[in-house]
Amino acid sequence: MKLSKIFLVLGFLFFVGGSFVLAQEEKSGLVTALSSIGTSSPSDFSWVNLIGSVIFGGIGFVAFIYGKKQSSYKPLFIGIVLMAYPYFLKSIFWMYTVGIVLCLLLFFWRD
């Protein structure tokens, strides 16, 4: 039951992020949106980006603490990556895609 709730929440977040990216592409044109992947300026504030950073950073923090207490390097390493990667990816689509893949990797790649 817990796994279905996790997938439901992650699917909702991916849907919200994807619909925001599509709205951006329709407004500014596909070529402009694709040329600006991974670039941002201080005025590019987005609530979707902030919420994704907090959620994936929180999951990464819990995984890091779990890996540290259990002396397991897999969740420790994935937790560090989950906490750090939102600083480097500014595209909402790629941030949610990488976050969901890392969370799935954390869940399925266990000892």
Image (cartoon, helix red, strand yellow):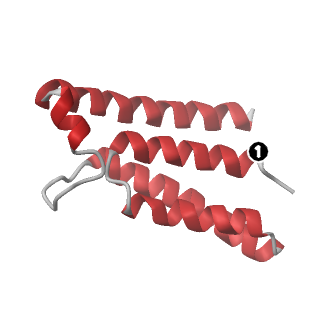
Residue at the location (51% across, 46% down)?
98
Looking at the image, which residue sits at the far top?
26
Residue 40 pos. (x, y %)? 21, 55
Which secondary structure lies at badge 1? helix
Residue 55 pos. (x, y %)? 48, 53
In the image, 17 versus 89, the foreground residue is 89
Residue 18 pos. (x, y %)? 37, 31
Question: Which residue type does callout 1 highlight?
Answer: Phe
Q: Which residue is mark 1?
A: 108
Q: Quadrant of residue 48?
A: top left
Q: Residue 105 vs residue 36: left or right? A: right
Q: Residue 49 vs residue 41: left or right? A: right
Q: Quadrant of residue 15?
A: top left
Q: Residue 76 vs residue 40: left or right? A: right
Residue 104 pos. (x, y %)? 66, 43
Locate the N terminus by quadrant: top right
